[in-house]
Image (spheres, rainbow, N blue to C red):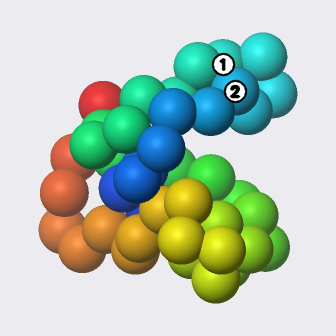
Amino acid sequence: MKVKMNVQTAYHGDLLRAGKVYNVDDETAKRWIASKLAEKAEDQSIN
């Protein structure tokens, strides 16, 4: 699932920056969206 990050965080050794779109597994994406770390991205490219 593509998510747009609201915060900067490290994930599996990679630095994910706020405001950018990344592809992560569905379970992780759901947790991040529920905790407001990210929001679901629609029709955007992966940075």
Marks 1/2: CA–CA distance: 5 Å
Relative to 7, say whether 35 is above or below. Answer: below
Residue 31, image x, y percentages = 74, 74
Circles 1 and 2: CB atoms closer than 8 Å:
yes
Residue 39 sits above or below residue 6 on the image: below
Instruction: Report how many numbered discs are placed on residues in the image.
Output: 2
Q: Position of residue 25 (x, y in %)?
A: 71, 60
Amino acid under disc 1: Asp
Residue corresponding to mark 2: 10
Which element type, helix, strand or loop, lies under badge 1?
strand
Residue 34, quarter of the rendered image: bottom right
**Disc 1 packing (10 Å; few <14; some 14–19; many ≥20):** few
Q: Of helix, strand and loop, which one carries label 2?
A: strand
Near-viewer residue (20 or 18): 18
Q: Is residue 19 visible?
A: yes
Amino acid, disc 2? Ala
| Quarter of the image where one finds residue 47 | top left
Write down the residue under mark 1.
14
Nearer to us in this view, 41 or 5: 5
Residue that appears at 58% across and 19% down: 15
